[in-house]
Image (cartoon, rainbow, N blue to C red):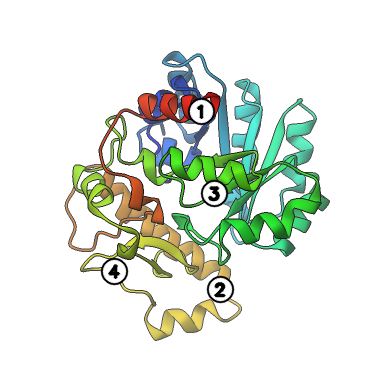
Amino acid sequence: MYPCSNPELVAAAANGGGMSIIQPVSLTMVHGYDEPNLNQGLINGIRYIKSITNSPLGFNALIEKGNEKYLKRMSEWIDIALDEDIRFFVTSLGKPDWVCEKVHSRGGYVYHDVTTRIHAEKGVSCGVDGLICVNNRAGGHLGSDDMEKMYEDLKDLDLPLICAGGIGSEKELQRALSIGYEGVQMGTRFIATTECSSPEGYKDAIVNSSEEDIDWTVKLTGVPVSVIKTASYKRENPWFVRLLLSGRLKHRTRWILNFLSFQRWRKMTQGRKSSKEIWSAGKSVETINSIESATVIMERLGQSISQ
């Protein structure tokens, strides 16, 4: 949900009964909570969200190697989140052992994004409390297997499994639960909401797209990201970028790509038009047909479970 998870959206989904996840890079560097410094800005942002919801909140920690300065910052941010009484953490793109150590010492829980059995086993060895199973219908970074195969591959690990990818309505939620998942993670559905601050053109593109309009690109981060087919999207990077991504500079190159994507998305969320807009979305667009309140969406999902 980077950079779409503005504070009002996070609070609205939480008010509907969901475990809303704060994305700290998005909060501080896109949505204005960067003053007087990033750490204090994060504190201010978390406290603002808590002022408009009384529901529990989660925290997203991207922990990919390659930038020690960033990892030091993320470690500080996790400490801040814990000090602000957040006890649910979602980790991705790295080894979460050190996050588990921090969070478990304060009575919290860590769920880890995985796309393969290998990643899942590494997460288990690090002590995670649950696995978020990112399938081939997901928005953002996506896996290669469908939700059924992922469940069958991982169910013996004896941890709660959360289905991530392709969940846009009560129909997909019920399907995931019937397979055996403990819950679902949703992103794309909450971009097309009244509380989301993303441009209306982005929301309309989600509403008007079908799953055939979704493809992948490596131009954003160096690994496949699910996007809506637009005039400006391309699957592959230029040859020299592909060369850098295959060599010893691959981690640094991915950080550069992430920075450029960050700048592009930041302009987009600020309403500044670009001829190079690339809109991330998953195949759940198939059942997203309107722009609604995130609170109403969450309440309806909850009601479908209790019926």
Specify the amino acid type for callout 3: Ala
Q: Which residue is mark 4?
A: 233
Select label 3 or label 4 by which is in front.
Answer: 3
Does label 2 or label 1 sit earlier along the sequence?
1
Numbered label attached to residue 250: 2
Does label 2 or label 4 sit earlier along the sequence?
4
Q: Which residue is mark 3?
A: 164
The residue carrying pointer 3 sits among few (fewer than 14), some (14 to 19) or many (20 or more) residues within 10 Å by Cα, namely many
The residue carrying pointer 2 sits among few (fewer than 14), some (14 to 19) or many (20 or more) residues within 10 Å by Cα, namely some
Q: Which residue is mark 1?
A: 18
- For the residues marked 3 and 4, what is the alpha-carbon distance in whole angstroms? 24 Å
The answer to whether the residue labelled 2 contacts the one labelled 4, judged by CB atoms less than 8 Å apart, is no
The residue at the far front in this view is 307
Above or below, 257 relative to 79: below
Query: Which residue is depicted at the point 45% across and 55% down?
Result: 140
Specify the amino acid type for callout 4: Tyr
- For the residues marked 2 and 3, what is the alpha-carbon distance in whole angstroms? 27 Å
Numbered label attached to residue 91: none
- For the residues marked 2 and 4, what is the alpha-carbon distance in whole angstroms? 22 Å
